[in-house]
């Protein structure tokens, strides 16, 4: 498969899974949506559309988002996510979306040393974790993906 095809499939899976979370899954009545990896802001833009009533808080090393997708200053935290998102632990986020995979196995393995526990700590009970990397953690129960999304292309969890 060409890298273009692979990229398109990943974007479609990302959108399908996020739409599934917003439309089909029961979510905690309260709680923010946390975007780990603002990047260009494309998924942040989508999260604003599908979660219009929720605070959306974004994290990245540096601001590189399109001007239409820059969060308000109080909803953007720059720095290493491992450190910057920690302040939101036990604040019971309703949804955490982590899009910080790199496609480089060695770098992703380092991220996976801390990301599963961070996501488990950020989510409130019943909250939903969405991730481009698989998250193995006793407090994260894997959920089925929408039928259109191939297994292992994106990952979905409910916080126990
Ligand atoms: N979801 C974004 C979008 O739709 O535009 C794309 C996110 S991009 C794939 C990943 C982003 O995560 C990059 O901007 C990168 O700087 C950031 N990132 C990756 N690992 C990080 C870390 N450990 N701490 C802070 N930012 C990180």
Image: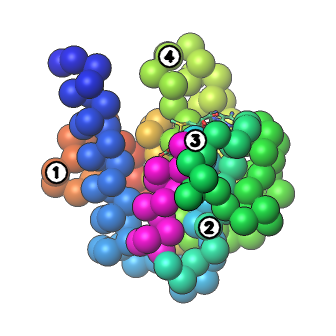
For mark 3, give the secondary structure: loop
Query: Between marks 1 and 2, how big is the CA–CA gap?
Result: 26 Å
Instruction: Name the residue tied to disc 2.
Output: 56
Within the magenta stretch, is there residue 41? yes
Between 157 and 51, the one nearer to me in the picture:
51
User: x and y percent of residue 120 in the render?
Assistant: 62, 54
Instruction: Name the residue tied to disc 4.
Output: 104
Which numbered circle lies on residue 38? none
For mark 2, give the secondary structure: strand
Task: Say whether disc 4 or disc 1 marks the residue closer to the N-terminus.
Answer: 4
Between 133 and 2, the one nearer to me in the picture:
2
Which numbered circle lies on residue 148? 1
Query: Between marks 4 and 1, how big is the CA–CA gap?
Result: 25 Å
Which residue is drawn at the image coordinates 39% and 46% (left, top)? 155
Task: Say whether disc 4 or disc 2 marks the residue closer to the N-terminus.
Answer: 2
Callout 3 touching callout 2 (CB < 8 Å): no
Number of other residues with Cα within 10 Å of mark 1, as a class: few under 14, some 14 to 19, many 20 or more = few
Of circles 3 and 1, the one toward us is: 3
Can residue 160 be seen at all in this image of the molecule? no
Query: Between marks 4 and 3, how big is the CA–CA gap?
Result: 17 Å
Instruction: Name the residue tied to disc 3.
Output: 39
Query: Between marks 4 and 2, how big is the CA–CA gap?
Result: 28 Å
Q: Is residue 141 left or right of residue 150?
A: right
Of circles 1 and 2, the one toward us is: 2
Which residue is drawn at the image coordinates 80% and 40% (left, top)? 79
Q: Is the residue indicated by label 3 positioned so its CB lies within 8 Å of ligand 1? A: yes
User: x and y percent of residue 67 in the render?
Assistant: 60, 53
**Magenta-drawn segment:** 40-51
Task: Say whether disc 3 or disc 1 marks the residue closer to the N-terminus.
Answer: 3
């Amino acid at each position: 498969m060409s890298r273009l095809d692979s990229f398109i499939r990943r974007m479609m899976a990302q959108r399908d899974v996020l739409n599934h979370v917003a439309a089909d899954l029961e979510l905690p009545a309260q709680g923010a949506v946390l975007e780990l990896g603002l990047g260009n802001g494309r998924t942040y833009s989508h999260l604003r559309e599908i979660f219009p009533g929720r605070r959306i808080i974004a994290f990245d090393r540096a601001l590189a988002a399109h001007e239409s997708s820059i969060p308000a200053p109080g909803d953007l935290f720059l720095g290493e996510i491992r450190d910057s998102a920690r302040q939101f632990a036990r604040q019971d986020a309703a949804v955490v979306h982590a899009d910080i995979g790199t496609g480089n196995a060695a770098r992703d393995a380092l991220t996976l040393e801390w990301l599963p526990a961070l996501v488990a700590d950020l989510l409130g009970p019943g909250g939903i974790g969405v991730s481009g990397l698989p998250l193995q953690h006793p407090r994260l129960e894997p959920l089925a993906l929408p039928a259109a999304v191939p297994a292992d292309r994106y990952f979905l969890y409910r916080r126990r």
